[in-house]
Amino acid sequence: MTPLAPLHFDDAREAAGLAAFLRRLLHYDRAAAVRLQAGGGALAVFGRPPSFEVIAIRTARLVDSVDLDVTVSAGELLEGIEESAGKAVVPDAVTGPPWAGVLPPRGGWEPVAGLPDAAAMRGAVGAAVAEFRTRDEELPEERRTRAERDRIGREIWSRTLADTGLPLRAVHAAQSLGFLPDLPGAQLPVALFAAGPWLRLRTPYGSVALRTVQTSLTVTPAAR
């Protein structure tokens, strides 16, 4: 197999940001795979952290226009990133997991109204974590089982944020992957979009997307 040419990032910070994303992804799954798509001077890296049931997307600008579509080991890709040099060696392809064949659409996204700001979203995640801990501690010994804890978790994290239809687990995923940092003195721009059955929460640090059966979304027409 002919090795792929290294990817050269437009800025060393792009390499560092991608490396940080991969480390967080590997924290949840040491055997994680990611799908890489590149074109027009941009790279998109897709991953799926277990339990969150979302697809996480991290993008980076490239020096050259590279055409690429391959699924690789997240760990091997991380090992191939040279942050100081702003480049990455793409490892050999692996057999992709099923999710890698069903990615969010590239176009057709329309803004969804009603998304709280980043601080409110972090607050919602914190409240949900606190509720889970309280309810877990209140369980009698005979009911403190993995199945019961999973049931409580599903109930809490399947709740939707405000009237957006976005499950709290998607917000939790965004925060856990570093997409919702608390920036002192600055307000983090966040946005929510819909395309068919898909929702996508986007921040400057990355996006999370998921398929949803919600249909009562308030879509704000995009400016033409």
Image: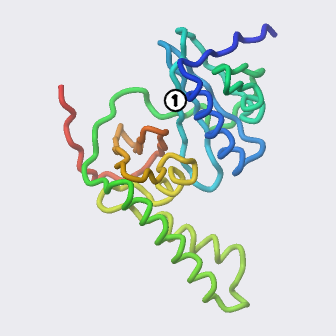
Instruction: Please name the residue shown 33% across and 30% down the image.
Output: 108
**Picture quadrant where residue 132 is located:** bottom right
Up the image or down, 84 lies above or below 129; here it is: above
Up the image or down, 41 lies above or below 189; here it is: above
Check the image and name the residue furthest to the right: 1
Helix, strand or loop at mark 1: strand
Please say which color scheme the image uses.
Answer: rainbow
Q: Which of 96 and 86 is in front in this view?
A: 86
How many marks overall? Answer: 1
Q: Which of 20 and 85 is in front in this view?
A: 85
**Picture quadrant where residue 154 is located:** bottom right
| Quadrant containing the N terminus in the rendered view | top right
Instruction: Please name the residue shown 51% across and 14% down the image.
Output: 39
Taking 26 as reference, is 10 left or right? left
Q: Which of 24 and 96 is in front in this view?
A: 24
Taking 162 as reference, is 222 left or right? left
Up the image or down, 21 lies above or below 95; here it is: below
Instruction: Please name the residue shown 48% across and 50% down the image.
Output: 181
Estimate the x, y position of residue 193 in percent, counting from the top left: 34, 41
Residue type, numbered disc 1: Thr
| Quadrant containing the C terminus in the rendered view | top left
Taking 76 as reference, is 205 left or right? left
Estimate the x, y position of residue 91 in percent, counting from the top left: 76, 22
Estimate the x, y position of residue 155 in percent, counting from the top left: 51, 71
Up the image or down, 1 lies above or below 88; here it is: above
Instruction: Please name the residue shown 33% across and 54% down the image.
Output: 117
Residue hosting label 1: 59
Crowd band around label 1 with a 10 angstrom C-alpha radius: few (<14), some (14–19), many (20+): many
Estimate the x, y position of residue 12 in percent, counting from the top left: 59, 24
